[in-house]
Image (tube, helix red, strand yellow):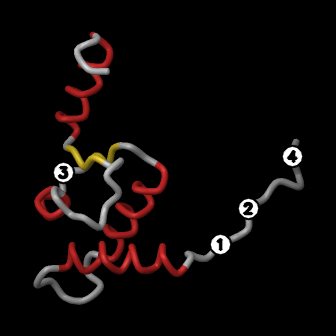
Amino acid sequence: MLSGLYTLPTELTAPERQQLNKIEKALQGNARLGKHADDAKHLFDAGKHCAYFITHDKRILKRSHGLDVLPPSLTVVTLAEFLKIYDDYETGRRT
């Protein structure tokens, strides 16, 4: 048993905070301030750690394509789109 294993909370760096704020503004549109803050945080975290962000949220799908505030390595897709990409990799149609 690992009794001494734990994580320390960390803060965002200034550039990370700026990027998160840009994503929040891009998603907000005409919505009330802060309404899409959680969505922005999820996209921000995915941009740091993932290649794909799978969602069916129409606002995120609509606003994420072409957003220059997301890293180019992050692709926002629906589950069906992701499964197609996965199948293409598995069958060798995509590398």
Q: Mark 2 and 4 residues: CB-CB less than 8 Å, in contact?
A: no
State the separation of the CA atoms marked 3 and 4: 38 Å
The mark found on residue 2 in the picture is 4
Assess disc 1: are there few (<14), some (14-19) or many (≥20) residues with their C-alpha within 10 Å of its C-alpha.
Answer: few
Q: Quadrant of residue 43?
A: bottom left
Q: Is residue 33 above or below residue 49?
A: below
**Residue 34: image location, x then y, percent:** 29, 85
Q: Mark 3 and 4 residues: CB-CB less than 8 Å, in contact?
A: no
User: Disc 2 designates what residue?
Assistant: 7
User: Disc 1 designates what residue?
Assistant: 10
State the separation of the CA atoms marked 2 and 4: 13 Å
* Residue 15 or residue 40, whichever sits in front: 15
User: Disc 3 designates what residue?
Assistant: 56
Q: First in sequence, mark 3 or 2: give its number.
A: 2
Which of discs 1 and 4 lies nearer the camera? The answer is 1
* Amino acid type at mark 2: Thr
Which of discs 1 and 2 lies nearer the camera? The answer is 1
Q: Is residue 44 left or right of residue 27?
A: right
**Residue 33: image location, x then y, percent:** 25, 89
Q: First in sequence, mark 1 or 4: give its number.
A: 4
Q: Mark 3 and 2 residues: CB-CB less than 8 Å, in contact?
A: no
